[in-house]
Image (cartoon, grey):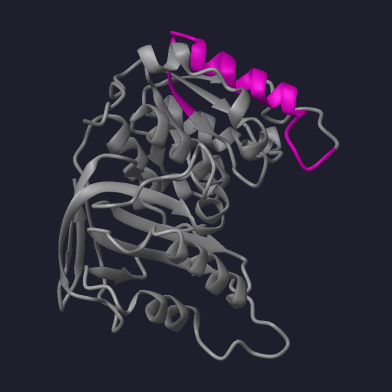
């Protein structure tokens, strides 16, 4: 049975770190202020707005140390990753989860943070939180339902997400543990210690900025490795800023996805609000959800 970290209460401490790409401190400020308004205390890691001159928020050693300290700090009840980008896979093997396993805490983020979600779920069977990160709070984003869904989940609230039907949807009901994240990362993790088992699970997938042929390639990678054959259900989030090659691929992104999974008879949802856009509901990895895909709407609830 999945182990769920304790939900947060007023006065709990949230740590903020950058285990991958660089994030200026000014772009994290609204997030910090909002978390305090929600009733939490905030501890900002050294990698947030650090002095790195490279793509990363610090050296591998610095990013590893910052995240490790937050994981080992008993006063920190949740860790919010300020951004994704790339870099978590460079440090995942060096992280020590001994103390974290005894006293788990919510690890929050998406995109490159899919590495952490998948690794922790596969190896330690502890739930993490795929959700908006610090940048989502900016430009009054802290007021929208997607950022507020993070507050709801963190404090133990139940979730019921509804989205519009899509002509490619496959109707049906699925019940199972929810797993998934960024398509590129899920494909790259195949064959590693962070790979996820998907049999009987509800899988969700999203991505950003990819060429259509690359989406096709990564989906076939998941298919060939058996990740798509025995699902309880499948959720396609948004594939934003998709690009086409000079010679057109010949299909829309949705057509690519539809054709790869057309042989399976489980429920499939297209266009669910999980993505690199502002439409990004908070989802608990490893927790049991019910997915209902009907003619008029899609409902996902825990």
x 16%, y 77%: residue: 296
x 49%, y 78%: residue: 253
Place of residue 152 in the rendered image (x, y in percent of width and height, measured from the top left): 28, 38
x 50%, y 44%: residue: 114
**What is the residue that sits farthest to the top in this orientation?**
74
Residue 240, magenta (yes or no): no
Place of residue 212 in the rendered image (x, y in percent of width and height, measured from the top left): 58, 76
Name the image quarter holding the C terminus.
Answer: top left
Query: Which residue occupies the foreground of this view, 169 or 33?
Result: 169
Query: Which residue occupies the foreground of this view, 177 or 44?
Result: 177
x 49%, y 49%: residue: 140
Place of residue 224 in the rendered image (x, y in percent of width and height, measured from the top left): 46, 65
Place of residue 283 in the rendered image (x, y in percent of width and height, measured from the top left): 33, 45
Query: Which residue occupies the foreground of this view, 102 or 281?
Result: 102
Name the image quarter holding the N terminus.
Answer: top left
Query: Which residue occupies the foreground of this view, 134 or 216?
Result: 216
58 left or right of 218 in image: right
Quadrant of the rendered image containing residue 282? top left
Residue 89 visible? The answer is yes
**Can you say whether 96 is above or below 207 in the image?**
above
**Can you say whether 30 is above or below 241 in the image?**
above
Residue 73, magenta (yes or no): yes
The stretch in magenta equals: 54-79
Residue 133 visible? The answer is no
Q: How many marks?
A: 0
């Amino acid at each position: 049975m999945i182990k769920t970290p304790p939900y947060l209460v007023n006065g709990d401490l949230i740590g903020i770190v950058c285990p991958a790409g660089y994030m200026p401190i000014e772009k994290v400020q609204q997030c910090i202020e909002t978390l305090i308004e929600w009733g939490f205390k905030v501890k900002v890691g050294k990698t947030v707005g650090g002095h790195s001159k490279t793509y990363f928020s610090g050296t591998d050693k610095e990013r590893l140390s910052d995240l490790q300290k937050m994981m080992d700090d008993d006063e920190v009840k949740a860790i919010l990753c300020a951004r994704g980008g790339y870099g978590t896979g460079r440090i995942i093997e060096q992280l020590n989860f001994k103390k974290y396993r005894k006293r788990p805490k919510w690890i929050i983020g998406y995109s490159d943070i899919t590495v952490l979600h998948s690794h922790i779920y596969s190896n330690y069977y502890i739930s993490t939180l795929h959700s908006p990160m610090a940048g989502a709070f900016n430009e009054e984003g802290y007021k929208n339902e997607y950022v507020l869904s993070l507050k709801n989940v963190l404090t133990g609230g139940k979730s019921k997400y509804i989205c519009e039907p899509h002509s490619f949807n496959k109707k049906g009901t699925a019940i199972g543990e929810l797993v998934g994240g960024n398509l590129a990362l899920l494909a790259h993790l195949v064959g590693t210690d962070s790979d996820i088992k998907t049999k009987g699970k509800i899988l969700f997938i999203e991505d950003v900025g990819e060429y259509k042929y690359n989406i096709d390639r990564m989906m076939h990678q998941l298919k060939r490795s058996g990740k798509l054959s025995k699902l309880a259900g499948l959720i396609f989030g948004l594939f934003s800023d998709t690009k086409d090659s000079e010679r057109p691929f010949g299909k829309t992104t949705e057509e690519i996805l539809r054709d790869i999974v057309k042989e399976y008879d489980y429920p499939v949802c297209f266009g669910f609000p999980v993505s690199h856009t502002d439409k990004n509901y908070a989802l608990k990895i490893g927790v049991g959800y019910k997915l209902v895909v009907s003619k008029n709407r899609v409902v996902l609830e825990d």
